[in-house]
Image: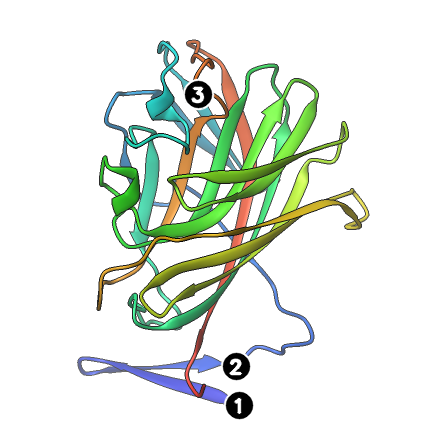
Amino acid sequence: MSTFVRSGDTITQFSSPSLRSLEFNFKNLTDGTWTLYDPDSLISATSYNSSTGANTVTFNTKAASADYTFLSTNSRWPRWYKELKIEGVNPTSDNLLMCGYTSTLVTLSAADYAVSIGACVSPTTLLSSNVQGCGSYHYTAGVQVGAGSTDYTAQVSTTGASGNNKLYTLTVTGGRHVGSSETMILSSANLRVQNNSRNSSNTMNAGQNLHEIVAIGARASTVSFTSGHTIQFKLGAKHAIWSNI
């Protein structure tokens, strides 16, 4: 079965995916579709390995600050963003969405850096409560890996055992609300290691276009950034709009 979407004078045909075998769309932050907003110039360089699907982000030196965590009133962490498109349609905060995310930390660092992928209303705001989004949260803690979910004002996290560097997150969002999320840390065999969930109390403004967002931050307010240090990760997403509830 196919879906036809009109944009101006152009009609595009999309094949409906099988619900027995959904696949993530993996993210290349250097493909020209993303805009980087980095208010304090934390990012020195970004590269992508097409063989592994991994993005590598290199940092500049920056002192520790709570504003670089996903726990602060302020959101000065760097982020890439673009309009969220589902079969050519940009959903709004009024729609009801189910979003799936996968995140793999390819290399682990002694520094407690974190990466988040999600969907939000306002990707460039410097006030955390105005982000109005929900997504996954993945961090390194020495040789261990932690995972959880965030609404960019607060987060829930669980530390997994060494080597379990993959996570799987589902979020239910929209209806003018940030919603809630469930996360599993997975083993290399895609078996559950740890899991947790988060319910947000934050609302979304009515009728706002939604954006994809990839954010880089610090796990804690005591974590500084050192020139040349990197975080390497592979991110995937799949989004769906419910239309007949």
Find numbered disc 3 in the image and state the secondary structure of the residue it sits on: strand
Image height check: is 81 above or below 83? above
At 44% from the left edge and 21% from the top edge, which residue is drawn? 58
In the displayed structure, does residue 216 sit left or right of residue 73? Answer: right
Residue for badge 2: 16
Residue for badge 1: 1
Image coordinates for residue 128, horizontal then vertical, percent: 30, 39
Label number found at residue 179: none
At 37% from the left edge and 47% from the top edge, which residue is drawn? 213
In the displayed structure, does residue 157 sit left or right of residue 212? Answer: right
Image coordinates for residue 113, horizontal then vertical, percent: 51, 24
Q: Residues within 10 Å of mark 1 (few under 14, many from 20)?
A: few
Q: Given the image, on which type of amino acid does mark 3 rest?
A: Thr
Q: Nearer the viewer, residue 97 or 78?
A: 97
State which tag comes first along the sequence, 3 or 1. 1
Residue for badge 3: 58
